[in-house]
Amino acid sequence: MQTQSLAASCRHSFPSYEPVPHLALGPANLRILIVNEDMRSADSLKLTLHELGYFTTFTAYSARRALVAVSDFSPAVALLDLELPDMSGYQLARKLRSHLQGCVRRIPLLAIAERLVSTDAALTRAAGFIGCLTKPVLPLELNRMLRQLQ
């Protein structure tokens, strides 16, 4: 399994807000699929997840790679960028929802959007997403959505 990581010297800075209480951190074994073609954005999201206590992640840099990896990785949740180079996040969601394996069809999907416009909420629900986050993804909001799945 191929994994991607940030250089050890890279540090991610968060906006100022109250620190995340240790008890609010998610389980280290929640399997999270990240689908984003931008390596820096994907690695930043992965680092954010690690800082929140989610350590089992797999990054796919295209929708096609995500479709190949989803069966082997068996994620508990997938974070899909809505703007992918080979198909939209909506198209990928539809493919996942119509997958041959029932466990893949039931994976909770969270959309990651550049900006949220009023039509996005209806489109994401129609495509089978359980929620939509905007970039930059705020750690507390991401953690809140992931905690709702447990």
Image: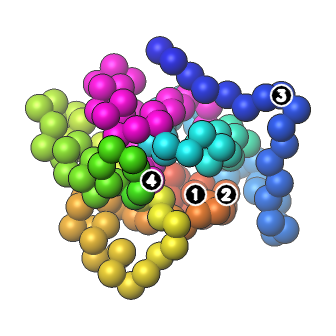
Residue, disc 2: 139
Q: Say few, some or many: other residues with alpha carbon within 10 Å of mark 3 (under 14 / 14 to 19 / 20 or more).
A: few
- Give the extent of the magenta segment: 54-81
Q: Say few, some or many: other residues with alpha carbon within 10 Å of mark 4 (under 14 / 14 to 19 / 20 or more).
A: many
Q: Say few, some or many: other residues with alpha carbon within 10 Å of mark 2 (under 14 / 14 to 19 / 20 or more).
A: some
Say if residue 149 shows up in the picture: no
Picture residue at 64% right of the left edge, 62% below the top: 136
- Whole-number angstrom distance, CA of label 1 to CA of label 3: 23 Å
Query: Is residue 115 a member of the stretch shown in magenta?
Result: no
Q: Tell me the mark number nearer the camera, choosing from 3 and 2.
A: 3
Between 110 and 4, the one nearer to me in the picture = 4
Q: Residue furthest front?
A: 85
Residue, disc 3: 8
Tell me which label, 3 or 2, sits earlier in the chain: 3
Q: Tell me the mark number nearer the camera, choosing from 4 and 1.
A: 4
- Whole-number angstrom distance, CA of label 3 to CA of label 2: 20 Å
Residue, disc 4: 81
Tell me which label, 2 or 4, sits earlier in the chain: 4
Residue, disc 1: 142
Q: Secondary structure at mark 1?
A: helix
